[in-house]
Image (cartoon, rainbow, N blue to C red):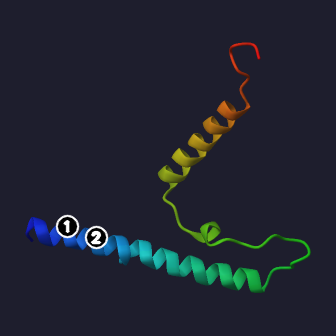
Amino acid sequence: MSSLEFTYLKQYYALEPFGASRDNLHSAQIAAIIANVNRNPKKTKPFKVSDFMWVDPKSRKDQETADFISNLQMRAKPKDGN
């Protein structure tokens, strides 16, 4: 595969993803639709597609850590005493 073909393939993938990530998205969309149809609207909030996206355990842990640190930084008092 030439460099030009590889560049075109990367651009095509950005527009039309394929493979496991695309399958994951389709499965999550179907799961969210089914879950929202069968939920009690008075007791639960609507599910999002992201609630059903599979994420490998290491990436999930890294994101949780980053979210935690971001939350701590947001709540920290300024050091200048204001």
Q: Is residue 74 left or right of residue 26?
A: right
Which mark identifies residue 7?
1
Residue at the (48%, 50%) spot, across then down: 58
- Assign a secondary structure to mark 1: helix
> Which of the 4 image quarters holds residue 80?
top right
| Residue 68 percent location from the top left of the image | 64, 39
Label 1 to label 2, Cα distance in Å?
6 Å
Task: In the rendered structure, find residue 63 and report the number of the disc placed on it.
Answer: none
Quadrant housing the N terminus:
bottom left
Q: Who's the residue at 54% across and 53% down the image?
A: 60
Q: Residues within 10 Å of mark 2 (few under 14, many from 20)?
A: few
Is there CB contact under 8 Å for labels 1 and 2?
Answer: yes
Amino acid of disc 2 = Gln
Outermost residue, left direction?
Answer: 2
Kind of residue indicated by mark 1 = Thr
Instruction: Give the structural element (helix, strand or loop) at label 2.
Output: helix
Residue 17 x/y as whole percent: 37, 75
Horizontally, residue 76 falls left or right of residue 1, namely right
Q: Position of residue 70 (x, y in %)?
A: 62, 38
